[in-house]
Image (cartoon, rainbow, N blue to C red):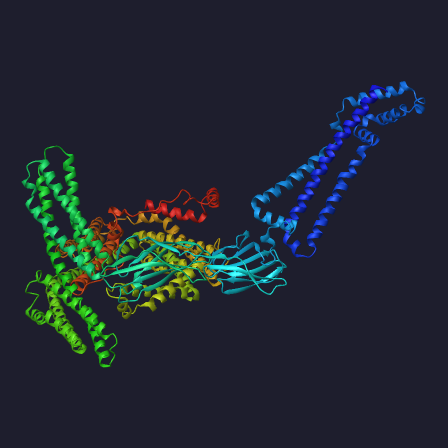
Amino acid sequence: MSANYGEIKKYLRNVGQTAWRVHLGKGAALLGTVLLLLLLVGLVFANQLLSIPYAHAGYLILCISILIYVSYRYVITPALPLGSEDKLALIIEERLPGLKDLLISSLQLGRDLEKPERAQLYSHELIYSLFKQTAEKLHDVRPTDIVERQDLKRNVKVFGAAVCIFVLLVIMNPRYVSQRFHLLLGSQYAPSALIHPGKPVIGDITLTYRYPAYTGLMSRTISGSSGDVKALKGSEVEILASSNQRIASASILVNASTKVPMAVETVNTIKGCLIVLEDGSYSFEVIPVGEKLGHTSQSHKIVVEEDAYPEINILSPTSEKVVSERDVIGLLYDAADDFGLKEIRLVVDEGPEAEPVKKDLKVVKETERQCRDTFNWDLSTLRLTPGKKVSYYLEAVDNDAVSGPKVARSKTQYLEVYSTQKRHEELLSLQDELLQEMVQLLAEKLVNRPDATKSKDELLLQQDTLLERTVNMLVLFDKVLTNMENDVLANYAVYYSLENMRNTVSQLSDGRKKYLEEIERGGPILPVGVITEIQGMQDREVVELENDIMFLVELLRKQRLDDMLNQDRNIEDMEKTLTNLLQDLEQGKTGELEDRALKELQKLEDVIRSIMEKLAKMSSNWGDEFLNMDALDSLKELTLNKDIQEMKDALARGDLEAALKAAMNATNSLGKMLAEMEQHAQQYADSTYSRTLQEMNALEKGLRELEEGERKVAQQTEDLKKDMQSRTFGDMDQALNGFFEKQLDRLGKMKDDISHVEKSFAENSTLAEYSRVEKEVDRLLKRRNQAMRSPFSLKDREAEGFGEKEYVELNKKLRELNEARNREPLLDTYEEVSKALPQLEEKLSQLDEMLKGQDFKESLNLARDSLRNLRFWDFELERSSSESVRRPGEKEEFPDEGLQEMSKDTGEMLADAARLNEQMVNDLESVEESFEKMSKAEPTEEETKQFAQLTQKQGELKEDAQSLARSMEELAGKSRSMGGEAAENMEEAEEFMEAAEGKLQGKNGPGALTDERESLYRLSQARKNLGEAMDRVAKGMMSRGLPMPKYVLKYRDRWDDGRDGFAMGEVEIPSEESYKVPKEFREDILEAMKKGLPQRYHELNKDYYRKLVE
């Protein structure tokens, strides 16, 4: 045989061996994978296989069948072709198409050559050549290239994955795998504990927790649990367990006493629910199939997890705060709970005598676990007792619906209730301090005279010291004025007087300071007359300071007297209370009567002591001219120790009636004494301030006469102007009359338009209701402000007509106003227009008067002014009407059709009035230059005489005005209640009179008439100021005093926290993004800028610039 044939045979053997190895590996991996999968299925269903009859045997038969089938189908059958050379050759030729039939032919011919009878039938050379060719083709092909390994790799990977899963399961729960594996093998291989026929074993426990709804927690399942339960109170625990025996019935035994039935899911699986209510334990009580007695498993723990208490902290204020009865305190708090808050409450404890007051601050949303918020606490809703401390804290309530809401308290903080009476007394003490400072400054100015200095440096040092002392006194003035603004018992007349004192001192010191600064910038040698000038300034300051000191002494006397007389209100309240107690005693109502009586007697003792202290302070400041013998005799009869001791002795004997009657006698004596003192105080006030009031009355009379004289001169000037105008225009007089009649006709139409607008406003029901509610709110606010000025309790304010019911009504009305404004923006605009229309009508009436008098210049000015107002309100109406259709971002609400219709109608009326007004202005401006030229014509001889007479009269009136102004200044210097406003208006009136006198002398009638009208206005203002001053003296100084108006806040705003209006409190610095305008708004602004100015604004801008240059 040929060597090539031997190589072919060897190659076939190598390929066959390789194919066998690959096939065996593939089959082993497949069998292993199938075996592991069957094992995993058996482990999972081990209990079921054991509990169902013949299931275990069926499982084993199924496993063996599957293994046999897989072995035959995927291992044995594919391996049979590998044992035949011809089949192996055909497989190789299939893998190597280039061989075609060479390999199978070579094998068959080789076998024929081995048989002598067939060898002679073939050509040996051709066969050897075929062997050679086949061997050469097989030489370069390795056996491993012929056998495919893809299936081997796939099966190995699958087997490896199955092994990993099995190993992972063993690692995670080895006990579970071991137990199930032994059960799967059969009872002969399982531990005795698992197969003991007398006691079932409960295992494979799965717990599913369902927490209470208020927690918001999702359910949680724990497989392979030890059985111990740990959950919140009220949680439901679903327990699923397995047994190694078939179970007929089962239950959960809680704390060895309470049974909870369980359901048998399968023959050896049980399921039940347990409600966690307390710490303890539970066990399973099962009855196997075929048995009557139950078996109890090992016990498992039950642990109740506590729902933690909430937490709450007051972030602001952080310390004790001093407040008044009507302050509003801002509370900042932070609260948190592990599962959710329910509400936040404020608790106020006013002392052992009263029950704590609770107020709900906020009802928190469900599942909200943290809350940070603020609350504005209005202290006027509480009945706070001045001078006492009040404790308060916040309570946070959680949403525990099982054990009940848990309540946590914040740290207790305190408010010291500032007594209005105490604050007023401190204010009086502060005024005493101011008085001492003024006296000290006066002494220093009297001693340190500028004319006693010898050099510039000595002078400047001396004056700097005095100026510094003056500044300190001004600071004290500011402090007094600021405290008066916060004092509900303060007298506005006193406030006004002190403010005038301060302003006078400030003006004088500022003038001297500027003069000294000029001297300091000069050379080392003082100019001649400088020291004399400074001495004169200081002497004027000394005179003013002496007057102020004497006046402040009178003010302090007045305030202390009023402070003591104000105790009559407390005396009246005590008389009412004592009377009620006596009536209760007579009616047999003795419950808690002794405690109430003791409290009232203590209050009475405090009031008597307070009155005695005030009298002691007054006795050092008031002379015998006030404290007459009658009042002192009443005081002597009021023996404090005797009355108090008599009342206490009666109480000790249990004689409440005698004690209360003694107290009534004491209050009656106090009331009579205060009444007598008030009578004599009124007599003293009348004697002290009546002269000032008489001087003011004399000034008012002279001012009225001066005003009447000025009015006559103005009328005569106007008549003269008309006569000159009629003569000057001559033939054009008729045309001029027609010109003004045309303007009057336009003015009449404008008035009709305005009247139509007012009528539309009055007839609109929506606007009428809005105005009614707004007026009602204003009325309630005024009543509230009056009640808030009461220094007494909320009960007293209720007696004055503004209690809790009125507060509720006020809040309701305010809410109605806000809702109306949010719903319809036109309402606010209509309200503003309706308030502005009377002023516009007044200007039109003035314009009508000027046109009838043919006063060209004044007519033009008034016409321009009214045109500006009409354009403005027309624009506002149009803007509000467009905004009222729908507000971006809010739900769609259709506007009030009646308001929209009225907006259109009134807009047309205002636009028409503006059009007529504009035509009037254009006509007046077109003839302005011509009219001015014609009005400058020379007067006649008769007119010249009239000008001379008017000039003389105006000069006389000017002298009278100068005299009145000096008198007012002198009176203001003596009595700061007078004020300087009247004198300032008189000086301005005098200046206009002097200007009118000059223009009359220059025969300029129109110009003089304008100045005369201005002087008349200043005179009317001076008379108004003088009337206010008389009212301050009559009501503020000669009676109990004037209350502080609510608008007096300038010193509080300026000095309370820092100098010059700079607040010193903490501020929150905004972030970079806080004021960043949204992109869409920026785009809208840029787009609007591209379009240019709207047409309507052109006219407004023109009016604005015209006004600047006029």
Name which quarter of the figure residue 159 lies in: top right
**1039 relative to 882 in the view: left or right:** left
Image spot of residue 644 (x, y percent): 13, 71
Image spot of residue 458 (x, y percent): 9, 37
Vertical comparison of 254 with 194: above or below: below
Residue found 8% across the figure and 65% down from its top: 626
Name which quarter of the figure residue 843 lies in: bottom left
Image spot of residue 979 (x, y percent): 18, 55
Residue 108 visible in the shown view: yes
Dividing the image into 4 quarters, which one contains the N terminus?
Answer: top right
Q: How many discs appear?
A: 0
Q: Which of the pair 854/1057 is nearer the observer?
A: 1057
Vertical comparison of 447 with 367: above or below: above
Image spot of residue 333 (x, y percent): 36, 54
**432 relative to 190 in the view: left or right:** left
Residue 885 visible in the shown view: no
Q: Which of the pair 811/659 is nearer the observer?
A: 659
Q: Which of the pair 715/151 is nearer the observer?
A: 151
Q: Residue furthest top?
A: 125
Q: Which of the pair 978/30 is nearer the observer?
A: 30
Q: Residue furthest bottom?
A: 587
**922 relative to 947 in the view: left or right:** right
Residue found 78% across the figure and 21% down from its top: 139
